[in-house]
Amino acid sequence: MSSIRSIRKSVVALVIVAIVIAVLAGFCLANGEDFSFAVSPWALLPPVVAIALALITKEVYSSLFIGVLIGALMHAKFNFATTMDTIVNDGLIESVKGTAGIFIFLVILGAIVALVNKTGASAAFGKWAQTHIKTKIGAKLATFALGVLIFIDDYFNCLTVGSVMMPVTDAHKISRVKLAYIIDATAAPICMIAPVSSWAAAVSGSVSSETYSGIELFIRAIPFNFYSLMTLVFVITLSILGFDYGKMSGFEIKAQDGDLGALNVSTTASVETHENHHKVRVLDIIIPVIILVVVSIIGLLYVGGFFDGVDFVSAFGDTDATVGLPWGSLIAFVLIVAYLIIRGLITFDDAMKCVPQGFIAMVPAILILTFATSLKNVTGLLGADVYVEQVMETFPPELASLLPAVIFLVATGLAFATGTSWGTFGILIPIVTKMFPEGHALLFVGVSACLAGAVCGDHCSPISDTTIMASAGANCNHVDHVSTQLPYAMTVAAISFVSFILAGFVPNPVICLIFSTVATVGTLLVIRAIHKKKQAKA
């Protein structure tokens, strides 16, 4: 039966692709060489097709590649040679160039996880957690707390929290997609409200203001960032209430029967625990994590110029996570290997075997990230960002009070279609600061709406790098993570949209935060009541 459904989905996907290509080819033939798909609604078509195919087929690699192909055909106007150049040069090669540092970080982090697993430290931590974290709620909240503590960078957050807390959530029969959701909910949202983070640095670099520094504008916008803040409230409330809804509920029911939904690829797939596992202590996982965190922060500060006399905040404002994280993680790997060898938990030969094992574990994430970045590059060639900018500039000024809510929707849509939060607020923040002159009561609300929408779209999009990292960190199917997270993200998005309408008329952070918090908790209580009624009838 499942094979028949798979065939049907594949046929539907092929029909959709054939229709799209036929329509595009028809437009090209009908309008001649002067016709262009650039800077028009057509520019958003490639990511929309890729996302639709991923949700239909549950297969992300081919879906992303087809999105790249369609974008390349549109850019090249169906010229074969130009299409291939676009796919290979502007898409794949440029994506590898731009994300090479993240690839290195992923491989090193995968190797560190394999090292910790090899020594038996993960198992030791799992046993300790079973003794001290005795409830399912406690396991969820502990995972949430660790995600909050690792606020420095979203990539770092996703993979570190996943590798550390996986034994704990597995022991309490929490599905991998639920783990991925908690990871994702404490990655981008935390980074977007943490003044010392790679995201704060990126936002600061997007601001040009005579009155406010980038970091000051970022900090003053935090109280109005309803999506990020309410996502945290949502996770805590949902964990305490102890229920799930949507597709997540089905995965959690399966988890109680032992089916956690983990992928077959694992950092422990071909590595046996070292014979000296009886020497392992809980500190043998805590110390490597501390080394990784501290040295990675040092790496980010170094790249930002902190050791050349630049102040701490400015160093984070000028840092580059794609350089700082590989820089720090490589040193951390050497220190961790030395520590584990000195402890007598692993030999040098076994430690080196963990390097290719870490690479194997991260291959799915690297492939998805490559195709997703290629899709972003091709979408950029079509001028999707310019089109969105033009649409935003035509908004009637007399409806300024509704503008924050509109900005939130536009940012969400753009981040969803392109899969990039940074690209979204990089495009929209300069527009928002022009719409609201300095000193305008809605300046900070507008900037917050842009940032909140960027995070929201990032959460919902299958081609988002942070979403991909969360799937990798929880070792679960990527499309399953997206489909189970979507109802939760859309619930918070709806509450945030209403909150931005209120903030447009009453730009008081205290009043708006009280309203949004009550709305979030109240919504979950209503959903739980409806969920219980459905269960009772069933």
Image: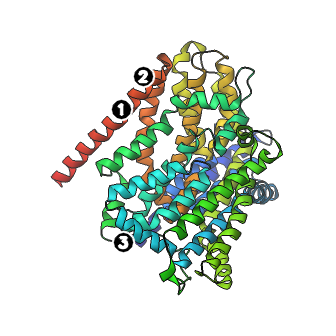
- On the image, numbered disc 2 is attached to which residue? 511
Return the residue found at the far left: 537
User: Residue 526 location, x and y as percent?
Assistant: 27, 39
Residue in view at x 57 percent, y 57 percent = 468
Q: Residues within 10 Å of mark 1 (few under 14, many from 20)?
A: some
Q: Nearer the viewer, mark 2 or mark 1?
A: 2
Residue 519 tag number? 1
Whether residue 434 can be seen here: yes
Question: Is tag 1's residue or tag 3's residue first in the polypeptide sequence?
Answer: 3
Asked if labels 3 and 1 touch by Cβ distance under 8 angstroms, the answer is no
Residue 1 tag number? 3
Q: Nearer the viewer, residue 68 or 518?
A: 518
- Classify residue 490 by image quadrant: top left
Return the residue found at the far bottom: 275
Q: Amino acid at mark 2?
A: Ile
User: Residue 202 location, x and y as percent?
Assistant: 69, 40
- Classify residue 128 by image quadrant: bottom left
Q: CA distance from mark 3 to mark 2?
A: 53 Å
Q: CA distance from mark 2 to mark 1?
A: 12 Å
Q: Amino acid at mark 1?
A: Ala
